[in-house]
Image (spheres, rainbow, N blue to C red):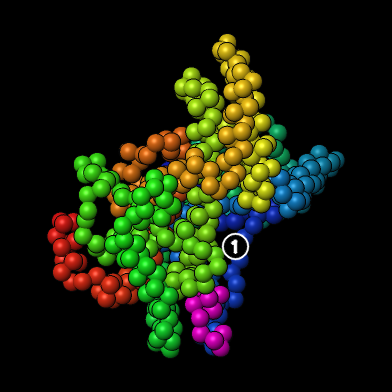
């Protein structure tokens, strides 16, 4: 997932949504909503997904992701980001030229002040009458135009007054940025800095509003998705056939003896130990266990298998993204485990050193997907070099030529899917995810399987996404799963499982 900004209310108790700002500030767009008549002639869940409007997709995303937040996703290194930056620079340079002219030209300044006034007013709640009056008085556009016509519009003074208003309205997380602006003497630089902070305040308020509305958006998403699916199910009774097969296989996996080998890839072969229970204690199969096993199986789904559960087609892209993250974490953990066996606890006791190795591995993950051998060759050489330099800087003995060759060879072999280190790590990550579904993420992090402690933060993120996805999907389609599971689990066994859980 991207970094999550701290979403907090403003210091003022009367909070409200924020507005937008210029220049070139992206505004949210909304696609045309599809009417029931616009559905494809052939009924399908895929068709239903395609006709969802933006509001429905947003409520679904918010309901599933408790850390959901809006942000300006425009990398500065991208072409669009570079173009935007150049346009911004041109605007502020033009403003500076106008104010420095003799006599000064205040046309751009007036437009900018007008926009700032609108943003400040949009940040107010209906009850903040005093601040509203202060903003109206300080930025009375008629008076400002008259002053501009006389040539005595005092831009530095107005900039300072606007900064004081921003200080009253911004969230505590923006205090540091505002304090830095207090030392800016150049009026154009100050206005640019204020405009940037106003853009951040806008996103803060949007995210605060989303957090406040999250329970309502989540409930709306659940009811909407279930109603749309039921609409299709009424017209196409066979719509749950693949879902039934999926749960049937999960139930069979739980009742089949696991393979004997320690590297068995089947997720059903991994028991989830609790702090007070042995991992191999047999338990009666319960509906919750079957559903958890079913979700674990989705992370091992064969792309050639077209019988994907109908109730999860909406979430297929998310599951594929989780599967991709899981593969990347498997490779990352394998690299760290092999490297630690050669460099010892001295280097790996340094978080900075571990972070360097993580950055090396993560930088080649995209290449690993298409060219694993080439990617691991580069990673092995860079990791070996980093270990050599770190040992040297600490005054420790460098790796021998034999050990260096062995290190590079073991790292390069991670490119092979049958690599034993990679297989064991993969199995242990699946064990962790299974524990997350049963015990929750925080409890699962207390007793991580060996070899995973160095990627604890990444695992926590992956596990939370997986748990959130399952939880939301189960809330939407729980009634359908219950009816299917009744046919798969004998009533006596289900009752025994329920009693055992109590």
Residue at the right extreme, as displayed: 102
Residue 245: image quadrant is: bottom left
- Going by the image, does 231 lie left or right of 134? left
Please say if 169 is above or below 220. Answer: above
| Residue 303 higher or lower than 3, as above or below | below
Q: Spot the residue most to the top.
A: 395
Residue at the image point whose x is 54% and y is 29% from the top: 339
Judge from the rendering whether residue 110 lies leftward or rightward of residue 208; answer left or right: right
On-image quarter of the C terminus = bottom left
Label 1 environment density (alpha carbons within 10 Å; few <14, some 14–19, many ≥20): few
Q: Position of residue 380 (x, y in %)?
A: 63, 33
Above or below, 430 against 232 in this view is: above
What residue is at 53 percent from the left and 56 percent from the top?
A: 321
Q: Mark 1 falls on what kind of element?
A: loop
Q: Is residue 63 visible?
A: yes
Q: Is residue 204 above or below residue 308?
A: above
Q: Nearer the viewer, residue 447 or 183?
A: 447
Can the viewer see residue 231 in this picture?
A: no
Q: How many marks?
A: 1
Boundaries of the magenta span: 40-50
Residue drawn at point x = 17 percent, y = 62 percent? 498
* Residue 12 picture location, percent across and down: 42, 46
Is residue 149 part of the magenta span, yes or no? no
Task: Provide residue 448's location: percent of width, then percent of height.
Answer: 36, 39
Q: Is residue 46 magenta?
A: yes
- Residue 56 screen position, x and y as percent: 48, 70
Q: Which of the two residues, 151 or 42, is positioned nearer the viewer here?
A: 42
Residue denoted by label 1: 28
> Which residue is drawn at the image coordinates 77% and 47% (left, top)?
86
Please state if 157 lies on the left or on the right of 353 as rendered: right
């Amino acid at each position: 997932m991207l970094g999550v900004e701290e979403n907090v209310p403003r210091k003022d108790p009367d909070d409200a949504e924020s507005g937008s700002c210029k220049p070139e500030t992206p505004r949210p767009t909304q696609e045309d909503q599809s009417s029931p008549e616009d559905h494809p002639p052939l009924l399908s869940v895929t068709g239903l997904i395609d006709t969802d409007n933006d509001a429905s997709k947003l409520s679904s995303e918010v309901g599933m992701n408790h850390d959901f937040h809006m942000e300006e996703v425009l990398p500065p290194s991208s072409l669009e980001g570079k173009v935007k930056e150049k346009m911004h620079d041109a605007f502020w340079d033009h403003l500076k030229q106008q104010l420095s002219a003799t006599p000064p030209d205040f046309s751009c300044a007036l437009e900018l002040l007008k926009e700032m006034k609108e943003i400040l007013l949009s940040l107010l709640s209906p009850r903040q009458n005093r601040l509203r009056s202060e903003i109206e008085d300080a930025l009375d556009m008629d008076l400002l135009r008259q002053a501009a016509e006389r040539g005595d519009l005092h831009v530095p003074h107005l900039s300072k007054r606007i900064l004081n208003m921003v200080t009253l309205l911004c969230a505590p997380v923006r205090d540091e940025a505002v304090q830095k602006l207090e030392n800016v003497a150049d009026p154009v630089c100050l206005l640019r800095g204020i405009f940037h902070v106003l853009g951040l305040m806008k996103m803060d308020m949007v995210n605060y509003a989303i957090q406040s509305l999250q329970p309502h958006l989540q409930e709306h998403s659940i009811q909407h998705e279930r109603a749309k699916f039921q609409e299709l199910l009424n017209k196409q009774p066979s719509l749950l056939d693949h879902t039934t097969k999926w749960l049937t296989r999960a139930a069979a996996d739980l009742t089949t003896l696991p393979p004997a080998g320690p590297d068995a890839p089947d997720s059903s072969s991994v028991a989830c130990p609790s702090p007070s229970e042995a991992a191999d204690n047999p338990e009666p199969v319960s509906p919750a266990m079957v559903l958890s096993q079913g979700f674990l199986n989705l992370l091992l789904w064969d792309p050639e298998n077209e019988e994907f559960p109908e109730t999860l087609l909406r979430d297929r892209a998310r599951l594929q993204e989780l599967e991709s993250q899981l593969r990347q974490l498997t490779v990352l953990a394998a690299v760290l485990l092999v490297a630690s066996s050669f460099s010892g606890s001295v280097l790996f006791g340094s978080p900075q050193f571990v972070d360097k190795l993580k950055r090396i591995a993560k930088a080649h993950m995209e290449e690993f997907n298409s060219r694993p051998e080439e990617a691991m060759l580069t990673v092995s050489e860079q990791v070996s070099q980093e270990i050599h330099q770190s040992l040297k800087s600490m005054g420790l003995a460098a790796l021998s030529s034999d050990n260096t060759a062995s290190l590079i060879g073991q790292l390069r072999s991670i490119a092979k899917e049958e690599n034993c280190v990679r297989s064991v790590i993969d199995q242990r990550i699946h064990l962790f995810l299974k524990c997350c579904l049963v015990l929750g993420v925080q409890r699962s992090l207390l007793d991580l399987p060996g070899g995973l402690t160095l990627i604890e933060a990444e695992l926590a993120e992956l596990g939370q996404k997986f748990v959130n996805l399952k939880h939301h999907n189960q809330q939407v389609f729980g009634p359908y799963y219950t009816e299917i599971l009744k046919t798969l689990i004998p009533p006596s066994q289900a009752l025994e499982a329920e009693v055992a859980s109590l």
